[in-house]
Image: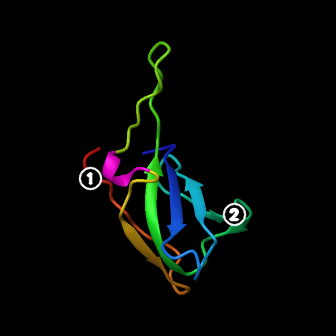
Amino acid sequence: MEGVSVYLTPEDRQVNSWGAAGLTNAEGFATLKTNSVFDGAVPGNYIISFRKLGEPVGMNTPPTLIPEKYALGKSQKTITVSPNQSEYMFALEGL
């Protein structure tokens, strides 16, 4: 899915305070940046979450297109970033 925001939030901010984020392209791949500046993510354990809003209907807030179990601030899904791996696959169920 294109246009999905991908967020990596450190599981333990005392070990790693550097989060990373990116936006998916037409093929569903995102290139992450740490603190919106540095390419990639610092190795470590993260909570991975996603966000994509639909079109607003009238004056209502746009609906989210991502299941709540993956939502930013609600996800409990984790991922470990290692220094020897540069590509990760994560399938969202329930779209």
Q: Are marks 2 and 1 in contact (CB under 8 Å)?
A: no
The number of discs equals: 2
x and y percentages locating residue 26 in the rendered image: 49, 46
Q: Say what secondary structure mark 1 lies in.
A: loop
Residue behind mark 1: 93
Q: Say what secondary structure mark 2 lies in.
A: loop
x and y percentages locating residue 27 in the rendered image: 46, 51
Which quadrant: the N terminus?
top left
- Please state which of residues 13 and 48 is positioned toward the viewer in this rendering: 13
In the displayed structure, 85 sits above or below 54; it is below
Q: Main secondary structure of the magenta part?
A: helix
Residue at (44%, 70%) from the top-left corner? 88
In the displayed structure, 70 sits above or below 14; it is above
Mark 2 or mark 1, earlier in chain = 2
- Quick check: 68 left or right of 16? left
Q: Residue furthest top?
A: 58
- Quick check: 14 left or right of 1? right
Residue behind mark 2: 35
Q: Dot 2 surroundings within 10 Å: few (below 14), some, or many (20 or more)? A: some
- Quick check: 42 left or right of 36? left
Three-letter code, disc 1: Glu
x and y percentages locating residue 56 in the rendered image: 47, 22
Please give the range of residues in magenta.
67-71
Residue 6 counted in the magenta span:
no
Whole-Å distance between the Cαs marked 2 and 1? 28 Å
Three-letter code, disc 2: Asn
Instruction: Give residue 54's quadrant in the image.
Output: top left
Residue at (58%, 56%) from the top-left corner? 22
Residue at (41%, 30%) from the top-left corner? 63
Check residue 30 in the rendering and tell me which mark sits there, or answer none: none
Residue at (36%, 65%) from the top-left corner? 77
